[in-house]
Amino acid sequence: MSIISIVGLQWGDEGKGKIVDFLSEKSDVVVRFQGGHNAGHTIVANDITYKLNLLPSNILRQNKISVIGNGVVIDPFHLIEEIKKIEENGLTVTPERLIIAENATLILPIHKIIDEINESLRSKDKIGTTKRGIGPAYSDKVSRRAIRVCDLSDENIIEQKVTEILNFYAPLLNASNQESLSKTKIVSSLKEIAPQILAYAKPVWKMLNEYNKSKKTIMFEGAQGVMLDIDHGTYPFVTSSNTITSQSFAGSGLGCTPITHNIGVVKAYTTRVGEGPFPTELSNNTGAILKEKGHEFGTVTGRDRRCGWIDLVQLNQMIQICGINSIALTKLDVLSEFESINLCTKYLIGDEEYDYLPASQTLQQQIVPSYISVPGWKSDISGIKEYSQLPENAKSLIEKISNLLETNIDIISTSPRREDTIILRDFF
Ligand code: IMP
């Protein structure tokens, strides 16, 4: 029995999917605890490619339990579509193995429209959201007008809350020349989908604490990356949830329990989709090579990812904030191109040196990264499965990163294929 947590330690897209998939094989339960269908990951199982946004990644393993916690914002229409796609391929998603928190918040179609309007109203600081309504749904949650999963069982509550939400947004819709939305349509679509969602609704907090008592292995699957955390990330260029490890408990209702393997997934370089500070971004040929070799295009929006060198300042900060005790290093093979590889070890802002990312967005914009350079290996390492087979310079780079971050690197991924993974620790 153990509690495992996996979060991406950069701005998302660290290659979590493969690591989660590998560790979920031996976990009984996988829990999503924040975010929504802004997350995207692709899993190939039995030669079929599945695109998952909202469902926990063990949904394709028929004997496992998948949990969507209260910290997630759920678009009910998207969720049912995702389930349908899986079932079209012969798998079944029953209420015995998909459990949704009855106190999770719903994303409504209006939230997508508000997401677009909010972005268009920003003058300079556009965030570049996924336009899936994530921010507005969380706003309604903290403003205490959201519709929650449990509300779907009460037609009067649905009607009352839809009225309140439409009234609240009416001035914004009017000012943006948007047609007002039909209350009747929204209410009837929610009533129609209600029984399908309610079939999976349970007190997740209770079940997770029972699973823990009965010594099941529970794995928390983070979405996005911790640099997109609403409090600790590059605010305001962040997502609308807490993405850090400690949110696992608040976003699921499992009582605070020591995490056996607290894993941070780190790409061997850095990428970011959307706007916002990115100290080590490379707008030159090196960045273009990283993008091309790393196939850095967003899975949800198809946008190009911005690319740059690994940033140990940002990583060190997030390791502390998340209490990470194990690193999974991904996409090491993408660095095989380079004569030398840069690692950012401190920031310079004016005459001042920083060993952390200052919170101010004004200062974040002015960061000049300071690098150390290590020699590359200039040979193809993709597909290597044994540490001993890596070139000496690749091993030195891994050891350097591990030493500078004072954290063990326990998993190294050398290609997108599941089997091309070096495992240096016995997790089970
Ligand atoms: P939102 O989560 O749609 O509100 O978008 C806020 C910011 O988070 C934007 O910069 C998005 O590109 C980014 N973002 C959201 N989800 C992901 C993800 O799963 N991977 C990477 N970036 C993401």
Image: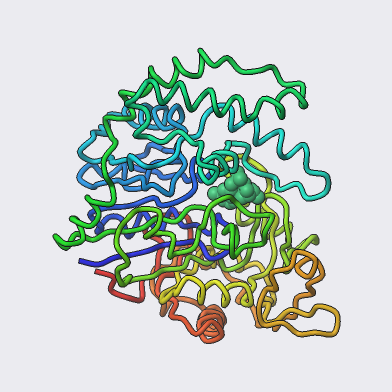
**Quadrant where the C terminus is found in the figure:** bottom left
Q: Is residue 136 left or right of residue 419?
A: right
Q: Is residue 173 left or right of residue 404?
A: right
In this orientation, does residue 153 appear? yes
Here the colouring is rainbow
Image quadrant where residue 245 sits? bottom left
Q: How many marks?
A: 0
Q: Residue at x 52, y 29 (%)?
A: 108
Nearer to me, 164 or 91: 164
Q: Residue at x 56, y 85 (%)?
A: 404
User: Which residue occupies the extreme right position in the image?
Assistant: 350
Q: Is residue 56 left or right of residue 427?
A: right
Q: Residue at x 61, y 18 (%)?
A: 181
Q: Position of residue 283 (x, y in %)?
A: 79, 60
Image quadrant where residue 192 sits? top left
Vertical position of residue 73 compared to residue 355: above or below? above
Q: Position of residue 341 (x, y in %)?
A: 67, 76
Vertical position of residue 309 compared to residue 416: above or below? below
Vertical position of residue 400 compared to residue 47: above or below? below
Nearer to me, 155 or 177: 155
User: Which residue occupies the extreme left position in the image?
Assistant: 214
Q: Position of residue 235 (x, y in %)?
A: 67, 59
In this orientation, does residue 297 appear? no
Image quadrant where residue 80 sits? top left
Q: Residue at x 28, y 34 (%)?
A: 200
Nearer to me, 394 or 189: 189
Q: Position of residue 239 (x, y in %)?
A: 59, 51
**Quadrant where the N terminus is found in the figure:** bottom left
Nearer to me, 163 or 61: 163
